[in-house]
């Protein structure tokens, strides 16, 4: 890692080029060449990472990060792969309010999941993501930064369409934790250097996988749409043709 990479990681609190992590199929029946995969950001991808993307038959990468983050830490160009940005949080709303304590950040993370159910702009971008996946004949990979929150929500929807149980979905959601632990440790250290342990504790919830965050989104789905089927059809406006395409792809 060179000095510039360390400086960028320190000043943004987000990235360090450890390669691609949290890369895995969305369902147990995913097929190389046509299936759907999820991961962390691709910035810093190693030569081995790029070969793996090619071997999996990835033809479309959907980047769920904000325009600013994607511009500062862009996905690499890999021959034969198209890159599309769908700025999921690009609606003027990310983390609400002033975060002073760790408890504030926990509540902000829950609110972030709820907005993927309530914010019209985010609903449109989630629907756009699922339509892109359904219409791509080749394999698709979607990602955000760590591949756990925005990516975790898209994966939840795809797994539900696939027919996975809620218990399976929760287990898969939690499976991100050991795959992002190294980044959580890195950010704890950089936050401590930047602002002491108070800052590190305040930011800690953003770097972990917590079922309470996911449940906040699911509770909002139940309250507004009666369940995930209603959310997919009424909230996202997906028709049966699209849902059938997704089932076949998964």
Image (cartoon, grey):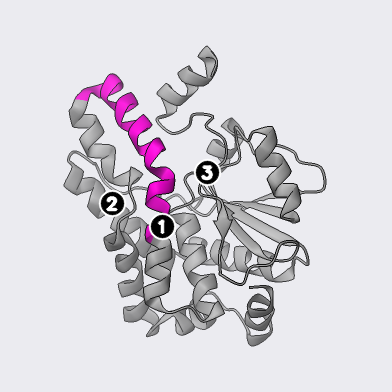
Disc 2 packing (10 Å; few <14; some 14–19; many ≥20) = many
> To which residue does mark 1 refer?
175
List x then y, in percent, for residue 183. Answer: 41, 36
- 2 or 1: tag closer to the N-terminus: 2
List x then y, in percent, for residue 142. Answer: 60, 55
List x then y, in percent, for residue 117. Answer: 41, 68
Judge whether 102 appears above or below 33 on screen.
Answer: above
Query: Dot 3 lies on which element?
Result: loop
- Predominant SS of the magenta segment: helix
Please tell me whether mark 3 or mark 2 is closer to you in this view.
3
Q: Which mark is residue 21?
A: 3
- Asked whether disc 1 touches disc 3, contact meaning CB atoms under 8 Å apart, the reply is no
Q: Quadrant of residue 200?
A: top left
Q: Which residues are magenta?
A: 174-196
Verify whether residue 20 appears in magenta: no
Query: Which of these two is toward me, 38 or 111?
Result: 38
- Residue ID at (37%, 50%): 177
Q: CA distance from mark 1 to mark 3?
A: 12 Å
| Quadrant showing the N terminus | top right
Q: Is residue 210 left or right of residue 176?
A: left
Q: Is residue 64 left or right of residue 81?
A: left
- 3 or 2: tag closer to the N-terminus: 3
Disc 3 packing (10 Å; few <14; some 14–19; many ≥20) = many
Query: Which of these two is toward me, 159 or 216?
Result: 159
Judge whether 36 appears above or below 189 on screen.
Answer: below
Q: Is residue 89 left or right of residue 226?
A: right
List x then y, in percent, for residue 151. Answer: 50, 56
| Quadrant showing the C terminus | bottom right
Query: Which of these two is toward me, 197 or 1?
Result: 1
The reply to whether residue 229 is visible in this rendering is yes
- 1 or 3: tag closer to the N-terminus: 3
Q: Which mark is residue 108?
A: 2
């Amino acid at each position: 890692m060179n000095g510039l990479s360390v400086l960028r990681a320190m000043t943004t609190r987000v990235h360090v080029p450890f390669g691609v992590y949290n890369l895995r199929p969305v369902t147990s029946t995913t097929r190389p060449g046509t299936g759907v995969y999820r991961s962390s950001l691709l910035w810093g991808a190693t030569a081995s990472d790029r070969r793996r993307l090619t071997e999996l038959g990835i033809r479309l990468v959907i980047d769920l990060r904000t325009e600013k983050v994607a511009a500062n830490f862009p996905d690499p160009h890999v021959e034969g792969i198209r890159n599309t940005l769908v700025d999921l949080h690009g609606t003027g709303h990310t983390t609400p309010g002033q975060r002073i304590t760790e408890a504030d950040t926990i509540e902000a993370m829950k609110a972030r999941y709820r907005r993927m159910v309530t914010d019209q702009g985010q609903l449109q971008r989630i629907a756009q993501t699922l339509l892109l996946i359904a219409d791509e004949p080749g394999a698709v990979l979607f990602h955000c930064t760590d591949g756990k929150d925005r990516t975790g929500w898209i994966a939840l929807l795809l797994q539900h369409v696939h027919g996975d149980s809620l218990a399976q979905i929760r287990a898969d959601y939690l499976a991100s934790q050991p795959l992002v632990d190294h980044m959580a440790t890195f950010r704890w250290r950089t936050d401590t250097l930047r602002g002491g342990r108070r800052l590190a504790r305040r930011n800690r919830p953003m770097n972990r996988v917590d079922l309470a965050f996911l449940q906040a989104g699911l509770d909002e789905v139940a309250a507004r749409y009666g369940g995930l089927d209603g959310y997919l059809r009424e909230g996202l406006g997906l028709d049966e043709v699209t849902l059938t395409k997704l089932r076949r792809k998964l």
